[in-house]
Image (tube, rainbow, N blue to C red):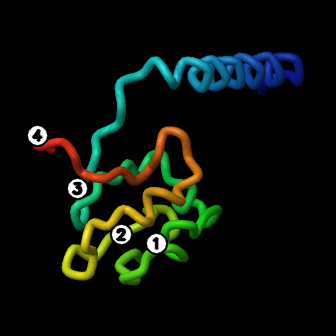
């Protein structure tokens, strides 16, 4: 059995580690980008994974973007013309959707 003091101490230490990891998140290497319909998509940056954002879906003129809770957005490559309208409305910084200007992805 664990005492309340030990429980709180372990909880605070775990919270501190998570907080420090969040502060240092900007110094971590960029997450792997996934190419979808002419766009680079960074799922780890997308607020849509938790149902908190629909900006890209609402602003896609081709309706090429769908949402899956927990996974984020999916771009239909056949419908997407790569206009980048969705990327312009992405509220995350850095953006979860970027135009594919890289040739190595």
Determine whether 94 is above or below 17 in the image.
Answer: below
- Pointer 4: what residue? 104
- Disc 1 packing (10 Å; few <14; some 14–19; many ≥20): few
Relative side of 52 to 56, left or right? right
The secondary structure type at the circle numbered 1 is strand
Marks 2 and 1 in Cβ contact (< 8 Å) = yes
- Pointer 1: what residue? 68
Mark 1 and mark 3: Cα distance apart in space: 17 Å
Q: Nearer the viewer, mark 1 or mark 3?
A: 3
- Pointer 3: what residue? 35
The secondary structure type at the circle numbered 4 is loop
Q: Earlier in the sequence, mark 2 or mark 1?
A: 1
**Is residue 79 or residue 8 the one in the foreground?**
79
The tag on residue 74 is: 2
- Disc 3 packing (10 Å; few <14; some 14–19; many ≥20): some
- Disc 4 packing (10 Å; few <14; some 14–19; many ≥20): few
Residue found 53% across the figure and 60% down from its top? 89
Determine whether 65 is above or below 89 in the image.
Answer: below
């Amino acid at each position: 059995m664990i005492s309340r003091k030990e429980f709180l101490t372990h909880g605070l230490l775990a919270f501190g580690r998570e907080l420090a990891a969040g502060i240092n998140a900007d110094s971590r290497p960029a997450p792997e980008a996934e190419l979808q319909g002419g766009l680079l998509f960074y799922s780890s940056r997308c607020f849509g994974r938790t149902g908190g954002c629909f900006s890209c879906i609402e602003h896609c003129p081709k309706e090429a973007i769908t949402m899956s809770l927990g996974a984020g957005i999916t771009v239909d490559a056949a419908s997407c013309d790569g206009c980048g309208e969705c990327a312009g409305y992405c509220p995350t910084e850095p953006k979860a959707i970027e135009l594919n200007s890289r040739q190595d992805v």
